[in-house]
Amino acid sequence: MRLDSVMPGLLSLLIILSIAGAARADEIKVLNDDAHFAEGPVWYRGKLYYVEYDRNSVSTWDGTKNSTFWSKSGCGPSAVISTARGEFLVTCYDSGSIGRISPDGKDLPAYTHDKDGNPFHGPNDFAPDHRGGMYFTCSGTAPGPVIDGKIFYIAADGTIGQKATEVHSANGIVVSNDGNTLYAIETEDHRLLQFKISVDGSLSDRRVFLDLDELTHNVGHIYPDGVKIDSKGLLYIGQNPRDAHAPLAGTIFVVNAEGKLLRTLKLPSPGVPNLALSPDEKTVYVMALDQLDQSPYHGKVYAIANR
């Protein structure tokens, strides 16, 4: 192999690693060392809520212990979120529904289609807006070449409508701090899309915000998964690599509103699909995978210093 074909990729990798926020061992804490595909977390009223896909459950961590909050066979949960009404919603990826959970963990009737009868294929992640509503993605038949992912919106009155189609493996999603922009991940295309949010919740002006392969100078395909935003408007992008030994496996990317890479967070596990920030934003709670491609998808839940 020619040296000049190797050097650009190697140099790019070194540049990315040079701005990495490599955490010391004492800055990484394992909160759960037996998680089965932990995903879609949210911090709510002093507890970390997160799903375990392979256990069909929603778990909580209260600062000292992990507990099962809710479980439903066949759900295949991907994310959990609290609502303005005090209940919880969970994306049931396998059953094609949006589960509803009471504040005390009881199962409520699920949403299975929107107001026009459109079904939910592979519900994935949530993003609350500033009007008491909630966007959520459906991945469609992903992974694969078919582009049939969608974005739906649950209005404050509970009405659900379809807002975007033809999103390739629609995944993580988040609303900007001013409420005017929606960011949505296309995992199979290695990128984030950007939409303008209208007063009625409709989406327009679709464009590519960030290509993760370009951001990392094509050192290898990046498969972005979850995305969160902090009070400064910085985006934290998780990933779930196809190869545990990929050059940037275990890396969370932190970018600004212009898509510039500011820093990275590096975890010991190769898969870091999703995350949540503590209320003071000093800690990042990371859902992680050690076993990427087969059940029980063993992994961990980490707390890492945000610096």
Image: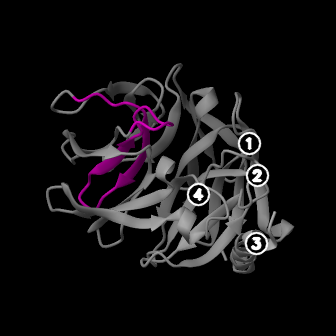
- Residue positioned most to the right: 25
Query: Relative to residue 251, is residue 158 depicted above or below?
Result: above
* Residue at 22 percent of width and 33 percent of height: 114
Residue 130 lies in the magenta stretch: yes
Q: Which residue is disc 3 drawn over? A: 10
> Can you tell which of label 1 and label 3 is closer to the viewer?
3
For the residues labelled 3 and 2, the Cα–Cα distance comes to 22 Å
Amino acid type, residue under disc 2 in the picture: Ser
Q: Which residue is disc 2 drawn over? A: 269
- Please give the label number shown on residue 299: 1
Helix or strand or loop: what does disc 1 sit on? strand
Helix or strand or loop: what does disc 4 sit on? strand
User: Residue 6: x percent and y percent?
Assistant: 76, 69
Q: Residues within 10 Å of mark 1 (few under 14, many from 20)?
A: many
For the residues labelled 4 and 1, the Cα–Cα distance comes to 15 Å
Query: Relative to residue 100, is residue 215 depicted above or below?
Result: below
